[in-house]
Image (tube, rainbow, N blue to C red):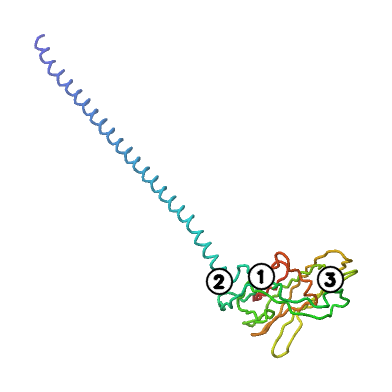
Amino acid sequence: MGGELSRMAPMELRREETVRAETYKMLLESDAFLHSHRLLRRELCITRMAIVVLLLLLSTTFCLLFFFQPTSACNDKGHNAKANGDVPLKPGAQVDTRRDDPEKPPSATLTIRCGTAPESESSTSPKTSPVASYGNIEWEARRLVGFSLGSDNASLVALKAGTYTVSLQVTYRSKEKVSCKDSIILSHQLQRYTDAYGDIEVLNVYETVYCQNTEWMKSMYSEAEVTLMKKDTLRVQSSQIGLIDCDGKVWNKTFLRVHLKPTG
């Protein structure tokens, strides 16, 4: 009996050692797993931080581009507007002759030059016929590309040949010293002058206003297409220069606009 117990004791010891070894191995594997899990979490955290920093950098770059680019574009736009003559001019201001820009189609925008045309005697009484004593309307240039304004301020000179669309508006209004008991005829003409044929009528616009001693205002708008050769001129004559409205925003009331008709 004592011999059997002595034989069983080593077996129990070996079994216990085996269990301890397996337990220790399991503990080591668990510790390795936890260590690997911590490394993965650390790498994931670092990756997330890198993504956040990258997004912040991209947002900052976008904001800088968004805030600085419009300022530059506005400055360029203002500079181009001044260079092209799009800035409204004050009455009586002098306009420099602009060089021709081959990249832009020819165009011109003119507004009436007030305070220079004297009122004729015929403008102090009602008209009975559209044919009367005509006078040239003088202009101020707000835009000139491929055109120039003559020294008389009444002749628009074409620097390039082509077919052009012409828009003309003349605004008249009643004046205190002009008596109108019944009606008055307003009329103006757009003329093209060429060296070969002289004056050629492009537009002839007239309208009767029934005033009967009341205040009135009349805007007369018309359009036409005209073929111009180089150095041809356009002029506008009115039978009632003294009744042209020169109050307020005259550039919206009386103007002459010319632009090259697109081809194709």
Q: Amino acid at mark 3?
A: Val
- Residue 171: x, y in percent? 76, 69
* For residue 18, side relative to residue 43 (left or right): left
- Residue 26: x, y in percent? 24, 28
- Residue 76: x, y in percent? 52, 65
Sequence order check, earlier mark of 1 and 2: 2
Residue under the point 24% across and 28% down: 27
Q: Nearer the viewer, residue 241 or 256?
A: 241
In the picture, residue 136 is in which quadrant? Answer: bottom right
Residue under the point 71% across and 67% down: 250
Please give the residue where the numbered disc 3 appears in the rendered image: 178
Q: Nearer the viewer, residue 257 or 40?
A: 257
SS of the residue under disc 3: loop
* For residue 61, side relative to residue 141 (left or right): left
Sequence order check, earlier mark of 2 and 3: 2
Residue under the point 66% across and 70% down: 91
In the current view of this chain or complex, which residue is farthest to the bottom?
196
Measured in 3D between alpha carbons, the distance from the residue under mark 1 to the one under mark 2, in whole angstroms, is 19 Å
Crowding near pointer 1: few (<14 within 10 Å), some, many (20+)? few
Measured in 3D between alpha carbons, the distance from the residue under mark 2 to the one under mark 3, in whole angstroms, is 42 Å
Sequence order check, earlier mark of 3 and 1: 1
SS of the residue under disc 1: loop
Q: Amino acid at mark 1?
A: Pro
Q: Are the two marked residues, 1 and 2, in contact with CB atoms closer than 8 angstroms? A: no
Q: Which quarter of the figure is the N terminus placed in?
A: top left
**Residue 91 numbered tag:** 1
Q: Which quarter of the figure is the C terminus placed in?
A: bottom right
Q: Amino acid at mark 2?
A: Ala
